[in-house]
Image (cartoon, helix red, strand yellow):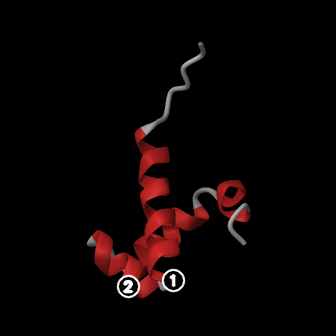
Amino acid sequence: MSSRHVSERDLRLFLVLDALLDHRSVTRAASALGLTQSAISRKRRSAPTFWSLTG
């Protein structure tokens, strides 16, 4: 059995993705996570290949 290391950064990006999919709004996702809209946008830009799977 192989184990895969998941970084803290990956987990944070997953939480942002989950909030965006759940709330379907950057504003509401940011509010739910206690972040600003610009923080959500920065996190989204930091992982373009990851996000390309959602669009």
In the rendered image, the vertical position of residue 44 relative to residue 47, given as above or below: below
The residue at the point 54 percent across, 20 percent down is 3
Please report contact status of discs 1 and 2: CB closer than 8 Å, yes or no.
yes
Residue farthest to the front?
1
> Which quarter of the figure is the C terminus placed in?
bottom right
Q: Return the residue at label 1.
A: 24
Q: Quadrant of residue 35?
A: bottom left
Mark 2: secondary structure:
helix
Quadrant in the picture for residue 23: bottom left
Q: Indicate the quadrant containing the N terminus: top left, top right, bottom left or bottom right.
A: top right
Q: Position of residue 36 (x, y in %)?
A: 35, 78
Q: Residue furthest left?
A: 34
Instruction: Identify which residue is drawn at 30% across, 80% down.
Output: 31
Task: State the image coordinates of residue 30 (x, y, percent, origin top left).
Answer: 37, 77
- Label 1: few (<14), some (14–19) or many (≥20) C-alpha neighbours in 10 Å: few
Q: Is residue 44 above or below residue 6?
A: below
The number of numbered badges drawn on the structure is 2
Locate residue 12, reporting x and y percent.
42, 53
13, above or below 41, in the image: above
Q: Residue at x 40, y 77 (%)?
A: 29
Q: Amino acid at mark 2?
A: Arg
Amino acid type at mark 1: Arg
For image coordinates 26% across by 72% down, the residue present is 34
| Crowdedness near tag 2: few (<14), some (14–19) or many (≥20) residues, C-alpha within 10 Å | some
Q: CA distance from mark 1 to mark 2?
A: 8 Å
Determine which residue is flagged by label 2: 28
Residue furthest top as drawn: 1
Q: Secondary structure at mark 1?
A: loop
